[in-house]
Amino acid sequence: MTTATISTSTAASRALFDRARAVTPGGVNSPVRAFNAVGGTPRFITSASGAWLTDADGNDYVDLICSWGPMLLGHAHPEVQAQVMAAVARGTSYGTPTQPEVELAEEIVARTPVERVRFVSSGTEATMSAIRLARGATGRDLVVKFAGCYHGHVDPLLAEAGSGVATLAVPGTSGVPASSAAETLVLPYNDRDAVRAAFAAHGPRIACLITEATPGNMGVVPPEPGFNAFLAETCRTHGALFISDEVMTGFRATAQGGWGLDGAVEGWVPDLMTFGKVMGGGFPAAAFGGRSDLMAHLAPEGPVYQAGTLSGNPVATTAGLATLRLATPEVYAHLDATATTIRDAVAEHLGAAGVPHTVQTAGTMFSVFFTGGPVRDFATASRTDTRAYAAFFHAMLDQGVYLPPSAYEAWFVSAAHDDRAVSTIIDALPAAAAAAAT
Ligand code: PLP
């Protein structure tokens, strides 16, 4: 059984990090895993179970990263594990159509407004392919995105992106051809006037507008009421496609993703949607989907080419299907209650310590900005006190709670976050708030 024993040793992680840096840039295979923004050594995790991570030194941590979203049910869920093991025993990839692909596609179609989906292996591929499809279907080139929204590391979408691009303050367009960046219009989030002006100036050339259903990659910044509906309508008026990126929010923010928070209530539907993370159950699986007539532009039905050797991989689709089938209303109710308890406690302790902060939420997702006042876009998110966050982060880590090593990320809970995990978090807060205050 996992116990919250934190030794002071990080020697094994440090030794692995030294070896990793020699053979991998920055010692990590995705920049968000690095501790550049908070200082110190990332922990090398050797196993995980339920809400807990165990590192190479034998330290246990309550996990508030959850693999950056996918682990909705917690780590090593017995039923998901059993189905994955059975799938592995049947062979790991065939390069032919399989039944789990059909069943996962049916499950996604049943839970969201998309009519057909195509599977890929990462969220980046999903957004890249959705944009190609939008360009192919409209015969136009320009893409509109919002500053602080992250849609993967695809060239035209890196401009002023959130997530690791924001955390490391790297120029979003380094290595991206100027011609590609020139086809992306970047607007401030939640700013209707900016959207109106962009469409007034460039409407006939805009293929699509892509937005996170509710942004989580600059921290959680919910759309102001009616903003997504306004975007959908603006796109419709100008003959552009509205792409809602649900890679992070899909099957996570609510059972119906971010769309469950507004679209399902207000009655609008995106032209295309992208999914990833939860739908892969911890394996590389992602998807894009939308109206049937739009999806018909894709090869082999239509002329827009898109493909993948491991797309719809049988092990990944089995894990995703098992995860979605186990994601019952009770699971979402538990996530909601757990997220509420944690964010209320964080706000209480930061408030008591006099640390300026703002807690924002979107369904079961939330984040804590170390700045006062509402955060409505990337400019206001950027006011966050990253030094205070680094102190808070390390105090939590030292007490056995693994937060995202960046002040601009959502915090994720799972169905396995039980009373013991939550009390470990709450017990760590007074010291962490005090550290952030100094
Ligand atoms: N879109 C959103 C909203 C994301 O949050 C992410 C990843 O965090 C991506 C796309 C890219 O997904 P992946 O990292 O699987 O390429």
Image: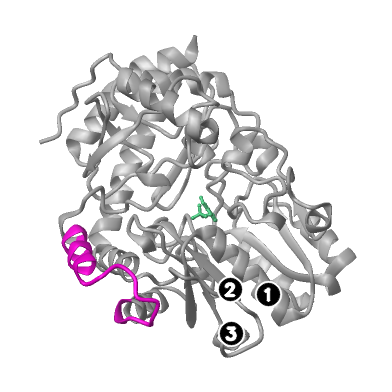
Q: Is 76 on the left or on the right of 284, as rendered?
A: left
The kind of residue on which mark 3 rests is Ala
Residue 99 colored magenta?
yes
Q: Tell us which disc is closer to us: 3 or 2.
A: 3
Instruction: Say if 431 sits above or below 384 in the image.
Output: above
Q: Secondary structure at mark 3?
A: loop
Residue 386 colored magenta?
no
Residue drawn at x 22%, y 46% is 416
Q: Where, by quadrant of the figure, is residue 298 drawn?
A: bottom right
Q: How many other residues sit within 10 Å of disc 2, few (<14), some (14-19) or many (≥20)?
A: many
Q: Nearer the viewer, residue 349 or 26?
A: 26
Q: Secondary structure at mark 1?
A: helix
Q: Tell us which disc is closer to us: 1 or 2.
A: 1
Q: Residue furthest top?
A: 438
Image location (x, y in percent) of residue 91:
25, 70
Q: Secondary structure at mark 2?
A: strand
According to the picture, the residue beneath numbered tag 3 turns out to be 299
Q: How many other residues sit within 10 Å of disc 3, few (<14), some (14-19) or many (≥20)?
A: few
In the image, which disc is placed on residue 134? 1
Q: Tell us which disc is closer to us: 1 or 3.
A: 3
Confirm or deny contact between disc 1 and disc 2 (CB under 8 A): yes
Q: Earlier in the sequence, mark 1 or mark 2?
A: 1
Q: Earlier in the sequence, mark 1 or mark 3?
A: 1
Residue drawn at x 44%, y 31% is 20
**Residue extent of the magenta highlight:** 80-100
> Which quarter of the rendering shows the N terminus?
top left
The kind of residue on which mark 1 rests is Ala
According to the picture, the residue beneath numbered tag 2 turns out to be 272
Residue drawn at x 83%, y 52% is 178
